[in-house]
Every structure is written in C-alpha cells, then in structure tokens.
Image (spheres, grey):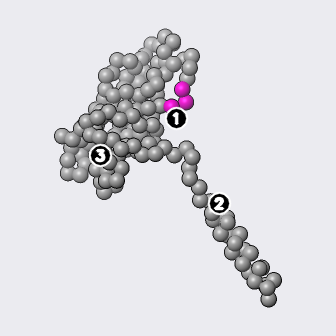
Amino acid sequence: MKNLRILYTGPAVLAGLAGLMGCHKDATATPSVAAAFSQPVSLRLQQPGAYPSLQAPELTLVVAEANDYRCPLGVTCAWAGEVRVALTVADERGIRQSVPLRLSGLTTAADSTVVAANGSRYLVVLHEVRPYPNASAPAPPQDQRFVFTVKRQ
C-alpha cells in the first residue's frame, strides 16, 4: 500500500514543481515610478509613471513604443530626423488612451498634448529623449530615458 501511495503522489508533486517553475519574476521588468505633477520625471521604455503616487495613481504614463530617427552626432544628414513616442495614458479606472508625441532633431524644445481623463484635463509634455544618438557610441534601447512633465489644467 505504501508503494501505491508514492506512485499516486509522485505525479502530483511533479505537477506542482512544474507549476512553480513556470512562476518567476521577470528580471528585465522595470519598476513603476511615483511621479509628482508639474515636476519632470524620467521614464524608461515600458516603465510606468504613476501620478501622484504608486498607491493611488490618478494618471499612469507608459512609453509603449519609441522610434528614434534623429540624425546621430558625428554624422552629416540631409534631415535632422525625429524621435516618435507612443505614450499610453491610463486614468484611475484603468481606461487607456494612446498619445503620439515627437521631437525633431536637436531643435524641438518639447512636444505636448492635452489628455482628458478622470473628468479633468492634463497637459503632457515630452521634454527630452536621451541619450541623443551618437554614431561612435550607439546606446541600446533599454538605456533610453524619456523626460516628461504632467500638469493638471
């Protein structure tokens, strides 16, 4: 009878271990950032910025995608290029909207848009995407930082 019990629990133990092996923390996940209104915040690609706090976010920004076509430093280009950012903005209920922003070459100081959420309006400003592309020292996408300011209106 003892051998029968071992055979019976063996598959259950193996199934449990297999289930645990499937559970893991993503080492590449970037933690959320608590961001204050009217203050600059630097976010990475896919990193949530929660306004005004992580515990009770009124607004959450995530850089969903970025395409950097700016002419790299050390290269002569016919066009200064631009960086296009697809921003996902979620309100306190989790309702999301996509917002496109872009900066052109070295000359655009900022790009902004007004977002309606939670019955209010928010001015979202993209100030900078860094590092600026450099032909002699290319930076991997995970090194990019996106500097935003969000203001209640």
Report the residue marked by disc 3.
Answer: 52
Image point 72% across, 78% down: which residue?
A: 9
Number of the front mark, 3 or 1: 3
Q: What is the x, y in percent for residue 52?
A: 29, 46
Q: Is residue 31 highlighted in magenta?
A: no
User: What's under tag 3, amino acid-wise?
Assistant: Pro
Give the residue at mark 1.
Answer: 142
- The quadrant of the image that shows the C terminus is top left
In the image: residue 112, left or right of residue 26: left
Residue 137, image x, y percentages: 56, 20
Amino acid type, residue under disc 2 in the picture: Met
In percent of width and height, residue 134 lies at 51, 19
Q: Which residue extends farthest bottom?
A: 1
Say whether residue 76 is left or right of residue 122. right
Taking 129 as reference, is 118 above or below it? below
Numbered label attached to residue 113: none
Mark 2 or mark 3, earlier in chain? 2
Give, as a single range, the part of the protein colored magenta.
139-143
Q: What element carries label 3?
A: loop
Q: Residue at x 37, y 22 (%)?
A: 104
Q: Which amino acid does label 1 sit on?
A: Gln
Q: Are marks 2 and 1 in contact (CB under 8 Å)?
A: no
The residue where tag 2 is placed is 21
Task: Give the distance between the C-alpha atoms of the residues marked 3 and 1, in whole angstroms.
Answer: 25 Å
Of labels 3 and 1, earlier in sequence is: 3
Q: Say above or below: 142 vs 134.
A: below
- Rendered-image quadrant of the N terminus: bottom right
Residue at the image position 74 percent from the left and 81 percent from the top: 8
